[in-house]
Image (cartoon, rainbow, N blue to C red):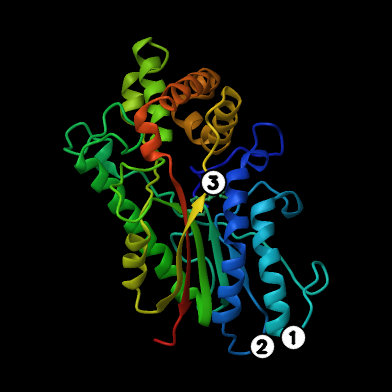
Amino acid sequence: MEDYVTMNSGDGPKSYTMNSKIQKEGSDQARWLLSTSIQENLELQNTSRVFSIADLGWHKEEQSWKYPNSMSFSMTMSPTISTRCLRPFHQGKNYMAAGVPGSFHSRLFPKASMNVMHSSFAIQWFSKVPGEVTREDSPAWNKGRVTYALSSCQVVKAFANQLFKDMEAFFRARSVELATGGLTVVLMPCRPEGTHPSESGIHFLECLGNALMDMAKEGLVDEALVDSFNLPVFLPTPSEVKEVVSRNEHLDIVTLDEMHQPPPQLSTPEGVRLWTIHIRAGLEGFLSKHFGSSVIDELFERYCQKLEEFSKTPHFTRVFEFKNLLLLAKRNGVC
Ligand SMILES: C[S@@+](CC[C@H](N)C(=O)[O-])C[C@H]1O[C@@H](n2cnc3c(N)ncnc32)[C@H](O)[C@@H]1O
């Protein structure tokens, strides 16, 4: 994994494990379609060989028994593997598990060695922040903001291009690693078809930018640090993802589905507080590296207030639609 993208570790109250309910709901919701699509589309060239699955963008600190999202994928896969390989699937008896270091934007496994490669809630992260959004002399300089939610079209374009470039690299690597008939499965947050990039849940993250700018004005953080900080995330539409995958001649899309994700409950202070902890579990490591850990408690106190204010604005209802995208693409026989 990329070192800079680390979720909070352990299983304490601020950990990712204890605060990934939204991802778990998304995984649970996708399970039926995922399972059906795998059953219908997976082809094994040689059932006597080892069956290889990878989960890319696994939360590295966790043990699988504690970790609900990747577990739900293994559970989904288990009956399929048993049916296809005609042998039962028992942890510790006939399967082996291992962690592989490295970024999923490049090759991780030998050529044609994998049958299924899954990734949930991970490939919306870029390999790096695009340089032009942090350079003062650039037309895409994203001064005082941490996302593209309220930024110029140059900034939006820079974020979008970085995601598409990274996704292209992700699918290129998978298409080499997959055996013919194997599947790559991606579950990721997206924005509704036909909407502008700024019309999405990304606004929830811009509340962090507002909190940081307030802190800069009060001298609690250096404004130049805020100007040089951006969250490397972009939410694409399903057709944008389709366009990227379609450019890969080795992959055929077999499922592309936009699913509604139950939105967070922000109508009560308790709901706002829980969402704040959820966001903190995902971003604290990343923010600490840039701003130092001493500002984190204050930053999330302010984030909570900004979110509460935002949840009362008319704009809030327009961006309050959470969607996930489930994509399955099959490795064809093109060499
Ligand atoms: C929001 S978490 C999702 C974790 C888990 N897959 C789930 O569904 O809950 C995103 C994960 O993607 C990993 N990640 C982000 N960029 C990555 C990269 N380039 N290579 C490998 N892992 C990456 C992060 O380290 C993190 O564990």
Depth-wise, is mark 1 or mark 2 nearer the camera?
1
**Quadrant in the picture for the C terminus:** bottom left
Depth-wise, is mark 3 or mark 1 nearer the camera?
3
Determine contact: label 3, label 1, CB under 8 Å.
no
- Where is residue 56? Give x, y as percent: 55, 59
Q: Amino acid at mark 2?
A: Thr
Q: Amino acid at mark 1?
A: Leu
Crowd around label 3: few <14 · some 14–19 · many ≥20 (10 Å):
few
First in residue order: circle 1 vs circle 2:
2
Query: Number of labelled discs?
Result: 3
What residue is rendered at 72% in x and 54% in y?
64
Q: Which residue is mark 1?
A: 86
Quadrant location of residue 270? top right
Q: Which residue is mark 3?
A: 262
- Where is residue 273? Give x, y as percent: 58, 26
Question: What is the number of the mark on residue 32?
Answer: none
Under tag 2, what secondary structure?
Answer: loop
First in residue order: circle 3 vs circle 1:
1
> Which one is nearer the viewer's eye here, 75 or 9?
75
Determine contact: label 1, label 2, CB under 8 Å.
yes
What residue is rendered at 48% in x and 19% in y?
305
